[in-house]
Amino acid sequence: MYAVIVIGTRPQIIKTAPLLREAESRGFDLDVVHTGQHYDYEMSKIFFKELSMPDPVSNLGVGSGSHGLQTGKMMIELENVFNKLKPDVVLVPGDTNSTLAGALAASKMGIPVAHVESGCRSFDMGMPEEVNRRLTDHCSDLLFCVSEWARTQLLKESIESDRVLLVGDTMYESVQAHRGDVDSDDILEKLGVDEDYFVLTVHRAENTDIEVRLRNIFETVMDFDEEIVFPCHPRTRKRLVESGLMEKIEGSKVRLVEPVGYYSMLRLIRDAEMVLTDSGGVQKEAFWLDTPCVTLRDNTEWRETVELGWNRLVGAEPRLIRKAVEDFRSGGLRKSVNPYDFGGASEKIVEELMQSFD
Ligand code: UD1
Ligand code: UDP
């Protein structure tokens, strides 16, 4: 029994770390294949180091490009790698182009596919991630869901119930496993940031590639009294420079820094007064670390965080951004449930794989 997990981006590396630990402790043979979608040190290697993950058995070095070029190159390379490695099952976490390429390449070769973080939906087919997650789900043999809502959604889409398993979120396990590392992280001291700050991340195509949205977001947040720590994704840095917004940011309270490591990011989220983000993972981490989240998107696949009052969808609309920040400033949030925890997601996933494919 031999399994391969295909990853390529920052959040996928983080989602995979608990699975690798669990696999190792159970003697389950699981190797990482990295597509090379993310390649800068601080977008990839740093997480392997921090999370003590073994190096990938193969890095396809695909890099950046248009969706078709990137996904197509990945599929060609993955077919070669799967022919060589001959995995019994291919795992694909999340909703990126690396996820879809892994799922399509494996399923066309008749290799069983297991989707980790299955069943999430934003119902916005304009987002590349929604296309990726829907197509991946519908060519997967095992679908590991993070929430009851996701499980129900897959059943509504006519996927056979015996292939759909509710296991919870490996990202939550990761947050739990590293609370001590977050306590000892010194990013705030290094940056010299005071107690009252916001943390901001922006990288989604709908915000970076539509200039009016990018402008609305940055011109609004620059007006807040708080300092704003902004670990900047390389995609966003390019657009900020091209649009001339970078110059304005440089003279503002927005503290633009390079992408930070995982422990530093969790510390920034945990200790912030508020999170403003268009990231998927960061919305959930804010929820788990008890920090209110203003989501700079029109929809979210993490609907539970909105329903429970910890997350507000504001798009890139200045009035809505300001209103959500004001409302959260008044505080008073309380949490009773974690809809993404069913006790040991990785353990459940590895157990199921061992039973299904051994
Ligand atoms: C990808 C995922 C997105 C996920 C995000 C996590 C897709 C379609 N999108 O978006 O779902 O939320 O990763 O961060 O798969 N770049 C660098 N260095 C790097 C990586 C990227 O400079 O190491 C720059 C390049 O200019 C590249 C751009 O960022 O063109 C976008 O990278 P890409 O991987 O295509 O998409 P992301 O925006 O990172
Ligand atoms: N993250 C990080 N450093 C950063 C920004 C994000 O470690 O500078 C982590 C974050 O804590 C979360 C994951 O990366 O675990 C989210 O990735 P991203 O926002 O790039 O992608 P998404 O979740 O939107 O797909």
Image (tube, rainbow, N blue to C red):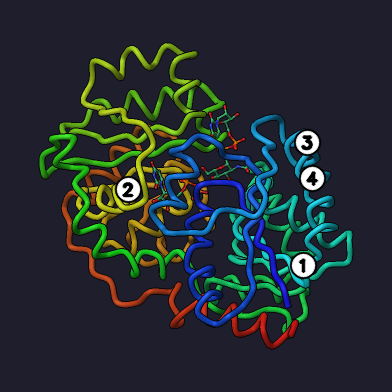
As measured in the structure, the alpha-carbon distance from the residue carrying label 3 to the one carrying label 4 is 14 Å
Residue located beneath label 2 in the image: 265
Q: Is residue 20 left or right of residue 101?
A: left
**Quarter of image, res 190:** top left
The local secondary structure at tag 4 comes to helix
As measured in the structure, the alpha-carbon distance from the residue carrying label 4 to the one carrying label 2 is 32 Å
Mark 1 or mark 3, earlier in chain: 3
Mark 2 beta carbon near ligand 2 (under 8 Å): yes
Residue located beneath label 3 in the image: 68
Q: Residues within 10 Å of mark 4 (few under 14, many from 20)?
A: some
Mark 3 beta carbon near ligand 1 (under 8 Å): no
Residue located beneath label 1 in the image: 87
As measured in the structure, the alpha-carbon distance from the residue carrying label 1 to the one carrying label 2 is 34 Å
Callout 1, which amino acid? Pro
The local secondary structure at tag 2 comes to helix
Mark 4 or mark 1, earlier in chain: 4
As measured in the structure, the alpha-carbon distance from the residue carrying label 2 to the one carrying label 3 is 31 Å
Q: Is residue 248 above or below residue 8?
A: above
Q: Is residue 167 above or below residue 99?
A: below
Callout 2, which amino acid? Met
Callout 4, which amino acid? Glu
